[in-house]
Image (tube, rainbow, N blue to C red):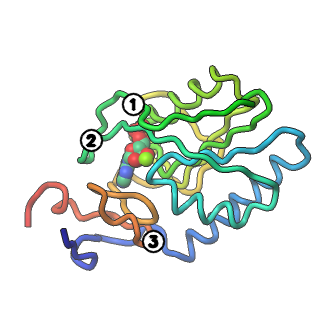
Amino acid sequence: MNYDIQNDIAKILLSEDEIETIVKRISAEIDAHYRERDSRLLLLGILKGSVVFMGDLMKHITVPVEIDFMKVSSYGAGTVSTGSINIMLDLYRKDFANTDILIIEDIIDSGRTLSYLVEYLRLKGAKSVRTCTLLDKPSRREVDFEADIVGAIIPNEFVVGYGLDYDEKYRALPFVGVLKPHVYSGEA
Ligand code: IMP
Ligand code: MG
């Protein structure tokens, strides 16, 4: 189905340049934190929203990294969280005990996805589990959770682009924009 970017985006929240600045700042933080370790650093992207952010991040990080992905679902097709987490694609690894995991997420909303995953990966025996999110909506928290690395704190608005979708659309936009409410309320 077709959609009209000009008509569907109310405003740009993070421009391409602003995102680039964030990516460089975060990759420098990751370099500093994981320097001089014997363990392996795994960037664990949460599909699908994190792929653009993770792709940009890994190009800037200079310490050796491995990548992998998990897919979890906490959302249906709309904008309201269901509150339960399903693992659709799990992480299989032989050497959890020698792996520092940095979860890469697009956005934290209720906090349920990441608080669940951090616990899940710790129980698997990972050497360390930390979290990095491009966006954070702290006003929407339903569980007590803070990411270790946050790109930008944003207000309670539904955003798309740079990997984030509404109903699988808008992921390829190079910026993060606020979706006009008419798009998800079904009005013209
Ligand atoms: P949480 O478990 O409620 O923190 O859910 C986080 C997930 O909800 C993210 O990975 C996104 O897939 C989705 N999500 C939350 N807010 C937005 C938004 O504004 N735009 C697009 N997806 C969102
Ligand atoms: Mg997501």
**Which residue position is annotated with label 2?**
76
Which quadrant is the N terminus positioned in? bottom left
List x then y, in percent, for residue 39: 84, 38
Which quadrant is the C terminus positioned in? bottom left
Can residue 109 be seen in this snapshot?
A: no
**Which residue position is annotated with label 1?**
86
What residue sits 75% from the left and 54% below the top? 29
3D distance between C-alphas at marks 3 and 2: 23 Å
Indicate the amino acid at tag 1: Asn
Dot 3: element = loop
Q: Quadrant of residue 64?
A: bottom right
Q: Residues within 10 Å of mark 3 (few under 14, many from 20)?
A: many
3D distance between C-alphas at marks 2 and 1: 11 Å
Query: Tag count in the figure?
Result: 3
Please determine whether, in this image, residue 35 is positioned above or below residue 73. below
The first of marks 2 and 1 along the sequence is: 2
**Which residue position is annotated with label 3?**
175
